[in-house]
Amino acid sequence: MVQFFKNWTLPIAMLAGILGYFAFVSIPILAPAKPFVNELIGFLQPLLIFAMLFLSFCKVNPHELRLRPLHLWLLLVQVGTFCLLGLLLYLFPHSPYRVIVEAAMICMITPTATAAAVVTGKLGGDTQALVSYTILINIASAICIPLVLSLVGTSASLDFWPSFLLILHKVFPLLIFPFLAAWAVRVYLPKWHRRLVECAGVAFYLWAVALVIAIAVTVRSIVHSHVSLGYELGIAGVSLLCCIVQFAVGKTIGARYHDRIGGGQSLGQKNTVFSIWLGATFLSPVTAIAGGFYSVWHNLFNSYQLYRKRQGQ
């Protein structure tokens, strides 16, 4: 049963999120609880992301992390594209395609998924190099997301500095504090660290819960969105394009440094729970579905890669 759940986590989580949302809004007796549930989700989502990253980083020895030329190229692609798309919105703030561009920005800057190390190991890639890049892109994202989003404008409609500080306040702790906390526990609480490493597999189940909530939030965004079906299809298309481009570019760069698998996973496999939260919190709520669509695309591609690996291809 556990293995079945692991193999089909994505469709189960998507189905649970969709059915859970419609069941909740359709039962009249639950109506008074809606404000409380909204506040609970707003608190629970970032807490789950923090816990997932913390448990995953507990398995990482900071002294074994190394900056490699591959990482610099991957950072240039991911951060550079995000900044260029942000510049496009800055120059054309009232573009009719703003939602599409925002969706692309989310798909590009979202950090590497913590589960990417597992897939990379199964495919025969360099797991340690990928973990190093995961930490680097989390740090880079924590810096550039507040800077760029505060320049192009957010749903908060604030001036630059209040907007920058607001986003920094929410994003930086979520991405950086888990690593610092895991490092502190490793150094000062070694007994607790050993216990946490033994429980690191719990991160998988936390991810499943977070994914259910993220899908439910995405469905709510779609239901209450006034964006046309054409825009929603456009977001699905641009998320697919971003997925293809990042896997292809990552593999191409990785091949030059003898880590084709790790390069592709570093760029292509995303922490889509974070991307859904980012879109729903700081951009047009409908852009949150970009992360939901991306989750489908990268999981389908990884399933295909693992299938080919099992077939010995």
Image (cartoon, rainbow, N blue to C red):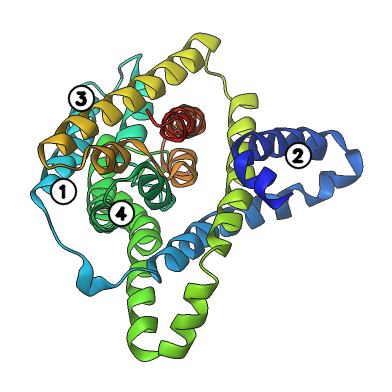
User: Disc 1 versus disc 3: distance between alpha carbons?
Assistant: 26 Å
Sequence-earlier tag: 4 or 2: 2
Q: Amino acid at mark 1?
A: His
Q: Mark 2 — residue? A: 20
Q: Could you tell me which quadrant the C terminus lies in? A: top left
Of circles 2 and 3, the one toward us is: 2
Q: Amino acid at mark 4?
A: Thr
Q: Amino acid at mark 2?
A: Gly
Sequence-earlier tag: 2 or 3: 2
Of circles 4 and 3, the one toward us is: 4
Q: Which mark is residue 285?
A: none
Q: Residues within 10 Å of mark 3 (few under 14, many from 20)?
A: some
Residue 117 vs residue 192, the one in the foreground: 117
Sequence-earlier tag: 4 or 3: 3
- x and y, in percent, of residue 30 in the image: 85, 46
Query: Position of 61 compared to 302: left or right?
Result: left
User: Disc 4 versus disc 3: distance between alpha carbons?
Assistant: 35 Å
Query: Position of 198 compared to 123: left or right?
Result: right
Count of residue discs: 4
Residue farthest along the front direction in this orientation: 312
Q: Residues within 10 Å of mark 2 (few under 14, many from 20)?
A: some
Q: Residues within 10 Å of mark 4 (few under 14, many from 20)?
A: many
Residue 99 vs residue 207, the one in the foreground: 207
Q: Mark 1 — residue? A: 71
Residue 194 vs residue 28, the one in the foreground: 194
